[in-house]
Amino acid sequence: MKFQFSFKEYDPKAEAVYGTILTLGNGHIGIRGEVELEPTIHGTTVAGVYDYTPYFYREIVNAPRVIGLQIFFNGEPISLSTQKLLKYERELDIENATLTTKIDLKTQNNGRIHYESLRLVHGKKKSLILLKFRIKVSEDGILTVISPIKTNVVNPSYRDEIMVKHLKVKDMEDKEEGIYAEVETLDGKYRIGIASSLISETTAKRISTKSAEGIAEVLTLTVKKDRTYEFVKYVVVLSSEIPNLKESAFQQLQEAKSLGFDKLYDEHKKYWDEIWKRAKIEIDGDKEAEKGLNFSIFHLVQSMPIDSRISLTARGIHGFGYRGHVFWDTEIYALPFFMAVFPKKAREMLMYRYNNLNAARENAKLNGYRGAQFPWESADDGYEATPSLIPLDMTGKKVVRIYTGEEEHHITADIAYAVELYYKLTGDEEFMSRYGLEIILETARFWASRVKYDEKKGYIIEKVIGPDEYHEHVNNSFFTNLMARYNLILAAKYFEIAKNSGGEWIKTLERVNVTEKEVQKWLNIAEKIYTPRQENGIFEEFDGYFDLVDYILDPYDFGEERLPEEIKENLGKTKIIKQADVIAAQYLLKDQFDLETIRKNFDYYIIRTTHASSLSMPPYAIVASWLDYEDLAYDYFMKCAFIDLYNLYGNTQDGFHLATAGGVWQIIFRGFCGIDIHNGEIEINPKLPKKWKAIRLKFFFRESLLSLEIRNDTVKVKLLQGRDVKIRAFGKDSVVKHGEEIVLSK
Ligand code: BGC
């Protein structure tokens, strides 16, 4: 695979968008893509490092900036904003996970400067960042390179002019090996230790400076015209779970320096080579789609957490959007990709939920319920982190009230759903018997206490917000009620399995203390849970939805801008919905509906959806492909695959849309390839867009690694590793054995 993304126009306003799409990361560290020679408010993200913040409870901390450089030639700054820019070229190479920058400048004194750099956040050595750069000047003179660890960083907040300080400096030291800075979050929970060293190929004079801005190494050298001078900046970023932070940081710095850039770079390339061997998807007949798809996969992989202390956040290690919180985006949109391609990582992300089960239990209790209620937005401690209000002005007089934290309860069922999907795909019994089961039981317990009995309707769920967030405080949301029912049935099913399995399964049942009687009650609720009414086959999104004001939208357009002002202000009174809701439920619970019912609902809701959330198009695209609405499915797929490259939602600067990226993979997997798991068998029902000749992809099914080539009339499956797998395609069954390839044709 060869994928390079080039950007040749410098626009200070666009830098924030490049910042996101050119982010490099390894799950532990994220370095945004802003050019290193210019100042930016963005520092470094260290996954899992949060601090208390007004309104948003806890937010991911903007850690010290380590990638920036200040360069002076004969006293003049080599900066894009003060000198004449002759050339600006940046290239993200997703094959090798590197970012190159090439800049030519003409100085005020008519000198010419050429600067080029190669940046990487090491794939394998999770704490290491490398920047190799070269400078060429057109006259002899004095070159000064300042390489700082900038500790005076702050977080952008709900308004641009409001910044939140999260870090205090605990230590700054200059040693022969390099400079060191250590910061602590204001709540005292985390420390970050950074060691950095700038090496010049040519002899240079070195000093260091300390100031309120941080600590810096300064190299000064006499340079000759037209000669290239090369430097390597080594940076090690550690967070406080590592003992002896300073010692470890210097030790890792020394190790990196003694290995040298080339060896480290080779190791990094090998790491990414292995990633792509597994994760790459090829599309014959549509190189553009292939690029967008693998670009999405690249950013998902870069955000893959390194352990279970934190899970994938809504905007990744790429930015501060949604404050680094974890939503249902993770379980419903992103996790299926990891379950199939990096199953160990999917397990860790589910373990994050398990590790926060006690917080979820407390959350349920606090709200007057039983069992475990997962927060709508979760940070490092698993408590509810959704803001309940956000001020709109400086004085705090105008506020927007946010109800999702109090009412968007479906997340609890979404997590249980993901646990079962993980088990179906991986067969990881150790996880399921010890941890997954506990999540499923405790979440079912929550729903049993959340429902109310109504004489006419049976069990109802009042005052919720479904995925469609335009309508608040609604009763009997189709999505919520159906997912709650699914959760209850799941718990009863796994209770039976556990009872008959012994071992860890039984231990978990004992720990959770579930009785037959309680399970009977769950089944009874599930049976009588109210399904919102149906009119002409269309399910009402929630009680009273059909009585709202109607408004029809063009399904090929998206966003709220197209709506008239009076509609925009009264969305809750209209039938307009923000994102896939009934259709998202029909996607997730496909087996409960026949295709004709799905079609009726799709036709109805698609022209009433704004897709104002980037989570909307993926489920619609998948269902569209099932319904043979090929043009629409393809149109949505392409929009999702290029959502950040083209900044389609206008907020790419806040971070990468990882739910959409996961959705892009799911459109391929569940939509165009039509892959589904039934009774331990993989079913494939291809619906490739017309111009696509073939899709080639790999995924794991129960520890067996499969390589597939899918065309509309043939499916080839090869078993690369693991046990036999049953495959069904075009109504034919077959078994693929180790090392073998089978071909199923129409
Ligand atoms: C969407 C939610 C989503 C959240 C974070 C909101 O705009 O409506 O479904 O979880 O963004 O991505």
Image: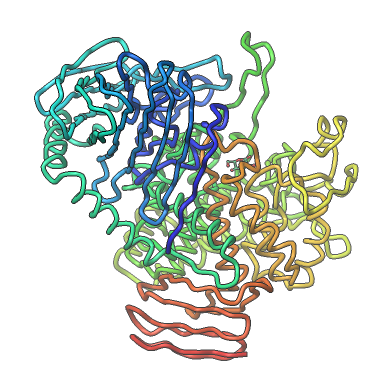
Quarter of the rendering occupied by the C terminus:
bottom right
Splitting the image into 4 quarters, where does residue 631 fall?
A: bottom right
Q: State whether residue 166 is above or below residue 504.
A: above
- Residue lying at 20% horizontally and 20% vertically, measured from the top left: 220
Percent from the top left, x then y, of residue 465?
68, 41
Q: State whether residue 336 is above or below residue 316.
A: below
Coloring scheme used: rainbow
Splitting the image into 4 quarters, where does residue 525 fall?
A: bottom right
Q: Is residue 528 visible?
A: no
- Residue lying at 33% horizontally and 61% vertically, measured from the top left: 273
Left or right, 141 with respect to 275, comes to left
Q: Residue 87 versus residue 175: which sits nearer the camera?
A: 87
- Residue lying at 41% horizontally and 51% vertically, measured from the top left: 93
Q: How many marks?
A: 0
Q: Is residue 360 visible?
A: yes
Q: State whether residue 396 is above or below residue 290.
A: above
Percent from the top left, x then y, of residue 190?
29, 28
Quadrant of the image where one finds ligand 1: top right
Percent from the top left, x then y, of residue 672?
62, 70
Left or right, 84 with respect to 660, comes to left
Q: State whether residue 168 is above or below residue 200.
A: above
Q: Residue 103 versus residue 101: which sits nearer the camera?
A: 103
Left or right, 737 with respect to 641, comes to left
Quarter of the rendering occupied by the N terminus:
bottom left
Percent from the top left, x then y, of residue 426?
40, 68
Q: Residue 243 versus residue 96: which sits nearer the camera?
A: 96
